[in-house]
Image: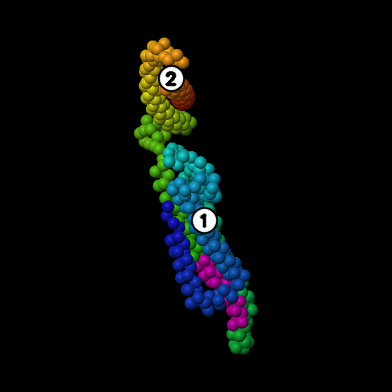
Amino acid sequence: MTNPRRFLLRMMVFLIVVVAVAGALFAPLKGAFMTNMPLNGLIVGVLLLGIIYNFRQVIMLYPEVLWIEHFHQNKAAISQQPLPRLLASMATLLGERDRTRLSLSTLSMRSLLDGIYSRLDESRDLSRYTIGLLIFLGLLGTFWGLLQTIGSIGNVISGLSVGGDMAVVFGDLKAGLQAPMAGMGTAFSSSLFGLAGSLVLGFLDLQAGQAQNRFYNDLEEWLSSLTRLSSGALAGSDGDQSVPAYVQALLEQTAESLETLQRTLARGEENRINANNSLIQLGEKMGTLTDHMRTEQTLMMKLAESQLEMKPILARLVDGGTPGGLDEQTRTHIRNLDVHLSRLSEELASGREDLIQQMRSEIKLLARTIAVSKDSAEQ
């Protein structure tokens, strides 16, 4: 967005030049101002109010430009920023939407731009009125002074006498002409201040209008980049709209619903892919668990075979042993063998429980994944 600072600089430079010229012509301007101080003071007061209002019109664009820049850069949510005045409707419409996927229809863009343009044009009404008011006050002072002049000349002419001393006659004529001259001073001074004030306010209003037009054009270019064109089948050969407004609004709403459905299907596809990956991982873990169970089964078979082989050996030891039974070394060996067999059985049992617990958690995870995939597909 274009910063309105340069328009403010132009206005300030112009005012500095006007003040410098007024300072150079201070003595004659003071004399003209004193010819009718109330009317000229009113004109100068209106001029000052118009200057302040025109500066205010340009300064009011700063919050609007700042809001658009923050929105464009996605710096903060709309709830964390003060709502602008000119862009209040657009801020309400666009504030909480997803800015990465923001798109407007042509009707929405045109309605937003029309509302903003009407606000900008309405804000300049007072400035235009002050320009016309200054011209009116100047003309009012002109006609007022002319009326005073005409009345005073009539009184002077009616008061003249043909006979008498010529010096006295010229003295009376000179004294009588002071009132018409005062009326002429009122007329010309009010016209001077009124027209000069309208000239100053006209230039300031021109700069304020240029700043607002630049702001409007930049806003239109930005909104045009976010606008989605309607289908060409809905428009006639001359470019005018050939379908009812509610039909086009319904079609645009349907298009938005289809876009939402497309995004939902994309998320469902992502969930399905994740579920397939989870099923693949579960299958791999189930294969690993099967290998472990096969290994345990092989170990159990080897243990059973070892026990079967040890049974006749133990029987022979019992039958061919010493009268007092087995010797101490054989008993110790048998006890150690019994302890190792007990530990091996416990380890096999705990390993089997761990495998069963892992299988349960994997099956629960699979069930949850399938349920999430089913919910996403239904949505």
The answer to whether mark 1 and mark 2 are in CB contact below 8 A is no
- Would you call the spot at circle 2 few (<14 residues within 10 Å), some (14-19), or many (20 or more)? few
Does residue 286 appear in this view? no
Q: Quick check: 1 above or below 293?
A: below
Per the image, the residue denoted by label 1 is 60
Q: Which residues are magenta?
A: 173-197
* Labels in figure, total: 2
- What's the amino acid at mark 1? Met
| Mark 2 residue element | loop
Q: Main secondary structure of the magenta part?
A: helix
Distance (Cα) linking label 1 and label 2: 110 Å
Give the camera-side residue of 305 and 252.
305
Residue displayed at 54% across by 48% down: 80
- Res 343 → quadrant: top left
Query: Can residue 223 be seen by looking at this rendering?
Result: yes
Q: Position of residue 15 (x, y in %)?
A: 48, 68
First in residue order: circle 1 vs circle 2 = 1
Residue at (45%, 52%) from the top-left corner?
215
Most extreme residue toward the front, as rendered?
A: 323
The amino acid marked with disc number 2 is: Asp
For the residue pair 73 and 67, the one nearer the viewer reads as 73
Q: Up-down: is 164 above or below 80?
A: below
Name the residue beneath numbered marker 2: 327
